[in-house]
Image (spheres, grey):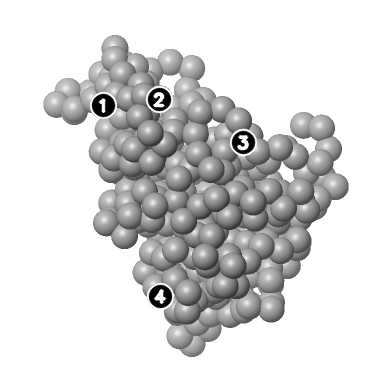
């Protein structure tokens, strides 16, 4: 449930036809920035008017156009990630707002579905650990979108698990997936959603080749480290106000390496009671 993020390598994007391209470190911050950055020469800008095409095309065409936008932006870099994001229609998982704009959207209960560029970023970071037959855990699964993407990537022989501590969100995510291309995997049990405290993980399907955490923890929860399979990878935002998207790799001998991928802003990984308090 990401609000926004920042990354260090260059990319291209625009806020409007008259705004200039920004360095990629600022791109993830577009929706919080008070004003556009100064123009950078020799960078091609993606006109905002192209986004209007999303509202005049059939749903899957709009979704594909969003993925094409993310390719030009630099968030989608591989065919594997592009294919799964084109297959799982984001509109089925967004309860209000415009699903094909690159921004987070509310899904109720003080939760959000992350912006598409953050979904793409996490899928790219985890793609090698989402091979057919592998196991994946999505902590704070929210709308169910990213868990459905995981399931499509690892296939019927694998296991994709989404956990969320709000029962109503678990129920709605199941209904969302039933309308999507991942519905057969849900029916067969390769994809499942459970009410659980994300800080404790989900031991029943462990160990996991891939773990994604969709909310920021003050530190990496030990149960998640224990449930990560040797050779596996976890992507998790860590910090309070100042957060970093950390990439956690567990080596074959069980040792852990951690690197920062981007500065981000996520909602906190917290208890159900705390999340349901008025912001």
Q: Residue at x 33, y 55 (%)?
A: 83
| Residue 169 point in image, percent of width and height | 71, 49
Is 230 positioned to the left or the right of 12 in the image?
A: right
Q: Looking at the picture, does residue 277 appear above or below residue 259?
A: above
Q: Are marks 4 and 3 in contact (CB under 8 Å)?
A: no
Quarter that holds the C terminus:
top right
10 Å crowding of disc 4: few (<14), some (14-19), many (20+): some
Looking at the rendering, which quadrant does residue 50 occupy?
top left
Report helix, strand or loop for mark 4: loop
10 Å crowding of disc 3: few (<14), some (14-19), many (20+): some
Quarter that holds the N terminus:
top right
C-alpha distance separating marks 1 and 4: 35 Å
Which residue is denoted by mark 1 in the rendering?
46
Residue farthest to the bottom? Answer: 253
Task: Specify which label sits upstream in the sequence, 4 or 3.
Answer: 3
Which residue is denoted by mark 2 in the rendering?
55
Is 78 positioned to the left or the right of 92 in the image?
A: left
Which residue is denoted by mark 3 in the rendering?
95
C-alpha distance separating marks 4 and 3: 30 Å
Report helix, strand or loop for mark 2: helix
| Residue 84 point in image, percent of width and height | 38, 56
Is 167 positioned to the left or the right of 138 in the image?
A: right
Q: Residue at x 58, y 55 (%)?
A: 178
Q: Residue at x 69, y 77 (%)?
A: 203
Q: Are marks 1 and 2 in contact (CB under 8 Å)?
A: no
Report helix, strand or loop for mark 3: loop
10 Å crowding of disc 2: few (<14), some (14-19), many (20+): few
Residue farthest to the top? Answer: 18
| Residue 145 point in image, percent of width and height | 54, 51
10 Å crowding of disc 1: few (<14), some (14-19), many (20+): many
Report helix, strand or loop for mark 1: loop
């Amino acid at each position: 449930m990401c609000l926004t993020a920042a990354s260090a390598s260059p990319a291209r994007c625009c806020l409007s036809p008259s705004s200039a391209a920004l360095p990629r470190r600022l791109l993830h911050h577009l929706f919080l920035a008070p004003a556009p950055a100064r123009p950078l020469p020799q960078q091609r800008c993606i006109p905002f008017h192209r986004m209007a095409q999303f509202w005049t095309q059939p749903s899957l065409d709009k979704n594909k156009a969003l993925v094409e936008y993310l390719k030009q932006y630099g968030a989608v870099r591989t065919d594997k990630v592009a294919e799964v994001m084109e297959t799982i229609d984001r509109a089925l998982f967004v309860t209000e707002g415009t699903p094909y704009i690159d921004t987070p959207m509310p899904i109720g209960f003080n939760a959000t579905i992350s912006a598409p560029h953050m979904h793409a970023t996490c899928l790219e970071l985890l793609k090698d650990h989402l091979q057919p037959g592998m196991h994946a855990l999505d902590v704070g699964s929210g709308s169910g979108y990213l868990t459905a993407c995981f399931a499509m990537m690892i296939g019927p022989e694998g296991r994709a698990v989404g956990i969320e501590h709000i029962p109503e969100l678990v129920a709605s995510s199941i209904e969302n997936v039933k309308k999507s291309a991942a519905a057969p995997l849900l029916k067969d049990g390769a994809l499942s959603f459970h009410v659980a405290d994300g800080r404790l993980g989900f031991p029943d399907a462990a160990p996991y080749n891939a773990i994604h955490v969709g909310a920021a923890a003050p530190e990496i929860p030990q149960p998640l480290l224990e449930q990560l399979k040797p050779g596996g990878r976890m992507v998790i935002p860590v910090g309070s106000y100042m957060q970093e998207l950390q990439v956690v790799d567990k080596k074959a001998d069980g040792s852990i390496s951690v690197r920062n991928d981007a500065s981000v802003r996520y909602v906190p990984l917290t208890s159900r009671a705390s999340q349901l308090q008025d912001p």
